[in-house]
Amino acid sequence: MSGIESRLAALKQKYAIKLKKHLQELEQVLLQVQTQPEGRAEYIEQALNLTHKLHGTSGTYGFTEVSLAMGTGEDLLRQMQTRTTLDLETWEQLQACLQQAYQAYRSTEPGEGEQNT
């Protein structure tokens, strides 16, 4: 592996650690969207910002499937912004996007014996 390749691999590994934390943060914000109707618009905006950033940065660092899932999630959140109630079908699709992102992330986690925290 060349010097550049090893540096890129190290950057990707560092991002992977941050990615897990960002997915967990998004999960918490989505919980607020679901359980806090009085602040829903603000929480949707927060979730939209997170999905937008994850869509872009994940793709940049080579986490293509995470990026695709976040792009779909971003579209769904934009739809939610225009509604006054929480649509069950859209909500379930959004949850599926989050699960896809987690699955894609887990498929890149280091094997046993390696530290990823």
Image: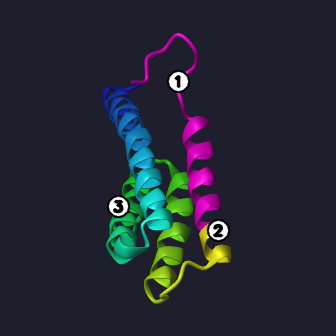
Residue ID at (66%, 66%): 92
Q: What residue type is labelled 3?
A: Lys
Q: Is residue 84 inside the magenta stretch? A: no
The circle on residue 93 is 2
Residue ID at (38%, 66%): 52
Q: Return the residue found at the far top.
A: 113
Q: Which amino acid does label 2 sit on?
A: Gln
Distance from Cα at disc 3 to Cα at disc 1:
23 Å
Earlier residue among tags 3 and 1: 3
Q: Is residue 95 inside the magenta stretch? A: yes
Q: Where is residue 59 in the image (x, y as percent from the top left)?
A: 45, 56
For mark 3, give the secondary structure: helix
Per the image, the residue denoted by label 1 is 110
Image quarter hosting the N terminus: top left
Instruction: Using residue 114 as the reference point, say whether residue 107 is left or right of it.
Output: right
Vertical placement of 55 versus 38: above or below?
above
Image quarter hosting the C terminus: top left
Q: Which amino acid does label 1 sit on?
A: Pro
